[in-house]
Amino acid sequence: MERIWAPWRMEYISSTKTKGEKRCFLCVDPKEDEEMMVIGRRGEAFAIMNKFPYTNGHIMVVPVRHTGLFEGLTEKELLDIMTLTQIMTSIFKDAFNVDGINIGINLGRAAGAGLEEHVHVHMVPRWFGDSNFMAVIGETRVISQHIDETYRKLREKFIERVF
């Protein structure tokens, strides 16, 4: 059996929400935006870095209100979520010269939702050749830029674009 040591994953593992403990990690007070790597806010939604990314730049667009029911989102929440998704699409193209973007919502555990209690939209920037031998043969992903640098760049572009 092969082993890959990934001690940074312990933060994710230990942050899993259990009944009566710890708040939802997507319920972010605006005072915590920098610490929690919130890229930007718009009305009833915000964009936040995925601290355990699929690839460089993986973010989530999240309603401010804690809800796991997509069908329960208000029209204002839906509009703000989709507008932020559109803004971030443009920022990815500008900041990272992406070749494509995967955009998706996983509703329910059977659909792959890791957090069923708080609806969120995943945005995963993609480049031709980003699935190399490490992912295909070694079942290992290589993230090419430190998350702090990615956050700084996306946040700067968001501020330029929105303000």
Image: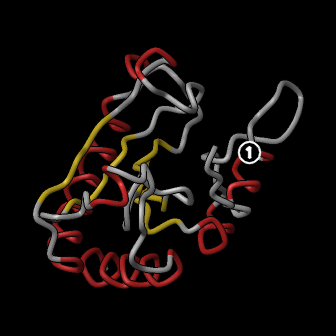
Q: Position of residue 136 (x, y in %)?
A: 31, 50
The quadrant of the image that shows the C terminus is bottom left
Q: Give the residue drawn at x 64%, y 46%.
A: 27
Q: Quarter of the image holding residue 10?
A: bottom right
Q: What's the colour scheme?
A: secondary structure
Q: Quarter of the image holding residue 1?
A: top right
- Using a 10 Å C-alpha cutoff, classify the residue at mark 1 as few (fewer than 14 neighbours), some (14 to 19) or many (20 or more): few
| Residue 97 horizontal side relative to residue 120, left or right | left
Q: Position of residue 69 (x, y in %)?
A: 47, 19
Q: Nearer the viewer, residue 131 or 94?
A: 131
Residue 42 vs 19, above or below: the answer is: below
| Residue 45 horizontal side relative to residue 7, left or right | left
Q: Position of residue 46 (x, y in %)?
A: 44, 55
Check the image and name the residue furthest to the front.
1
Q: Give the residue drawn at x 26%, y 61%.
A: 132
Q: Give the residue drawn at x 28%, y 74%.
A: 162
Q: How many marks?
A: 1
Q: Label 1 sits on what residue type?
A: Ile
Q: Position of residue 158 (x, y in %)?
A: 33, 75
Q: Quarter of the image holding residue 52?
A: bottom right
- Secondary element under disc 1, as helix, strand or loop, is helix
Check the image and name the residue furthest to the right.
20
Q: Which residue is mark 1?
A: 13
Q: Nearer the viewer, residue 8 or 21?
A: 8
